[in-house]
Image (cartoon, rainbow, N blue to C red):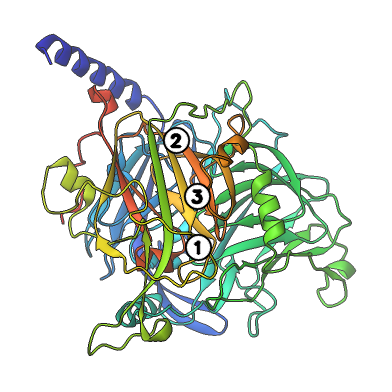
Amino acid sequence: MNFQRTFFLFFLLVIAEIVAAKHVTKYFEFNVQYQNVTRLCHTKSMLTINGQYPGPTIAVNEGDHVVIKVTNHVEYNMTIHWHGIRQMRTGWADGPAYITQCPIQKGHSYTYKFKVFQQVGSLFWHAHISWQRATIHGAFNIYPKKEYPYPFPKPDAEAQILFGEWWNDDVETIVAEATKYGGGPNVSDAYTINGQPGLLFPCSSKDVFVQHVDHGKRYLFRIVNAALNDELFFAIANHSFTVVEIDATYTKPYKTEFILIAPGQTMSVLVMADQPKGRYVMAARPYVTSDVPFDNTTTTAILEYTDLKSSESHESSHPIFMPKLPKMRDFLLATEFSTSLRSLNSREFPSWVPLKIDTHLLFTIALNLQDCPKGKICKGYFGGRFSASVNNQSFVHPHIALLQAAYHNISGVFSPDFPNRPPHQFNYTDLKLNLNMNPHFSTRVSVIPYNANVQLILQDTSMMGTENHPIHIHGFNFFVVGQGFGNYDPLKDPSCFNLVDPPMRNTIGVPSGGWAVLRFKADNPGVWFMHCHLEVHTSWGLAMAFMVENGPTALESIRRPPSDLPPC
Ligand code: C2O
């Protein structure tokens, strides 16, 4: 590169920084601290941000610079991930532990800085280390710029719905047990809506979230599934939803009586408060596709119209309306919902679906069982240890963050040879399959050239049983151009792809015993984690990382690491 060009690029960079400095900056402080919280008559001291459970809501506008100073006051290591934020060139602020940063240790701070770039809608943030996100999570709402108002009728008001899970015991102890014995961790004691289990649990009469609404108004419900291990159906009695946005991308309005939302997914729906004044139950319960133990309870909250006459508002005397939820194993309704969503693809919000593919990837997803090491006790099926893998690679977290290792050329941390295709081919979804491959335990990354158009086929397998896996990719939104059951057929299935207005997401529920085809442009240099957003599966190794190379110029390359990046 000659001197003039370097100088010119430097000049551009300075201009870009000056322009950037003019933007609005929103500043937040997050303190990781203990707080006593009581649910289901159990009080426990648990990890929170600023003592809040769920944590504080971040509200910003598209185009804002966001600065969040996180200070860790507890003995557990911590990182925070801004789930769904693209982090264009700012991978250092993404947050997954040992992928883009080493953890923030006790007594230390790290300031996450990034710009919200061409994204509007409902996202969330959560701890991204061990299972800390069980209690450390909150909403991340992005409002549109004035020049680009919502492409749907303006809501009169908003409501926030965060699903979570509550364990009476300390979550870290549960994970430590599960890791030691290689078993499945305890299922939670309750699902929650905004931190509250609801009416159907014993000893929880006070643990109920109530959303007040005014008759005749239109509400935007911002819905987040921050539960660790289950997809959920959600409905409100007598009220329907119009889905208008998923994972901070606009959709064609889709009217429905219920939604299905996987851990890691978010959405905005419009709800008209047009029913007779009263109290209506909002309820969520899991969509289950496996035989592993799960929490089968229903969590509830109340939608209550304001100005109920005193006779109506007296809880015991007036009727409460219950919603109809799909059955827990209703995969037909689940499929109908997820295949009905379409991206908006309007003139203002076009869908640029990659049509010419440069990088073809086929990844199998599997749960595995390993033999128990001699002299150890194991609590997986048949006395083995559970693990999980992508293309038969079970991800091992390194001790130095991958992004740091890549940026500073530190060798021995990862190898750049993650297989682009399954190392062994078999009938992936054969239910009679009696095959358990021992996965390869490794830290391998898949290297993607800058700006490549990537097609990624995610193929579930029936090893240890099929299951619906919500696969999340950091740093990108992807189009879901097709999905189906059985094995993906490269000859037949492409003819059914939607290349016009496929839904765009950051987390896809890959159908149980089926496949999904994703497309994205690798326009964001850095190291990006991909994993199952069922925390138990990530712990077992159902994860990998992409390494997207820098582009030809400084403006197409990852920025320098911030000076306060936690040391490893
Ligand atoms: Cu919401 Cu890697 O996570």
Q: Is residue 553 visible?
A: yes
> Pointer 3: residues within 10 angstroms few (<14), some, or many (20+)?
many
Q: Residue at x 36, y 57 (%)?
A: 424
> Marks 1 and 2, Cα distance to the nearest angstrom?
32 Å
Which comes before the other along the chain, label 3 or label 2?
A: 3
Q: Quadrant of residue 343?
A: top right
* Residue 271 place in picture, x, y as percent: 74, 48
Which comes before the other along the chain, label 1 or label 2?
A: 1
Cβ(mark 1) to ligand 1 < 8 Å? no
The residue labelled by disc 3 is: 507
Amino acid identity at mark 1: Pro
Give the mark toward the camera: 3 or 1: 3
> Marks 3 and 1, Cα distance to the nearest angstrom?
21 Å
Q: Compared to 104, does 386 lie above or below?
A: below
> Pointer 1: residues within 10 angstroms few (<14), some, or many (20+)?
many
The residue labelled by disc 1 is: 54
Label placed on residue 520: 2
Amino acid identity at mark 2: Phe
Q: Is disc 1 placed on a helix, strand or loop? A: loop
Q: Compared to 344, does 292 lie above or below?
A: below
Q: Is residue 391 left or right of residue 343?
A: left
Q: Quadrant of residue 196?
A: bottom right
Viewer-closest of 401 and 321: 401
Q: Quadrant of ligand 1?
A: bottom left
